[in-house]
Image (cartoon, rainbow, N blue to C red):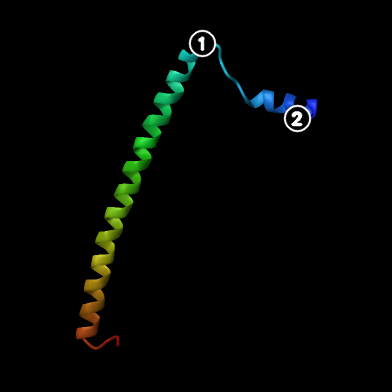
Amino acid sequence: MPQSVLFIMGLFLYFPEDKREYIPAGLTMAIFLIFAILAMRFIILYNRKEVQKAKELEEQLRKKKIID
């Protein structure tokens, strides 16, 4: 690779000698991952409830012959 590319990559890549510096980043990533999973579960559960409500509304409208 050209030296300029290696220099630019070196600005963004940092590998510390003391690996304990990875601990805060790992904890932060774990916390965000847990919250992302919980948020996704909440969205899925809420969506299931909304689908059920939509089906009930559709059934009511079919009984009243408003829709086919």
Split into 4 quadrants, where in the image is the C terminus? bottom left
Left or right side of 35 for 1: right
Residue identified by numbered label 2: 5
Badge 2 or badge 1: first in the primary sequence:
2
Specify whether 7 is left or right of 21: right
Place of residue 45 in the rendered image (x, y in percent of width and height, measured from the top left)? 27, 54
> Could you say which quadrant of the image residue 7 lies in?
top right
At x 64%, y 26%, the residue is 12
Who is closer to the viewer here, 57 or 39?
A: 39
Q: Label 2, secondary structure: give it.
A: helix
Indicate the position of residue 48 as horizontal and vertical percent values. 27, 60
Q: Which mark is residue 57?
A: none
Q: Position of residue 13 (x, y in %)?
A: 62, 24
Circle 1 packing at 10 Å, graded few (<14), some (14-19), many (20+), is: few
The residue indicated by pointer 1 is 18
Q: Residue at x 39, y 24 (%)?
A: 27
At x 28%, y 63%, the residue is 50
What amino acid type is highlighted by mark number 2? Answer: Val
The residue drawn where x is 21% and y is 86% is 64
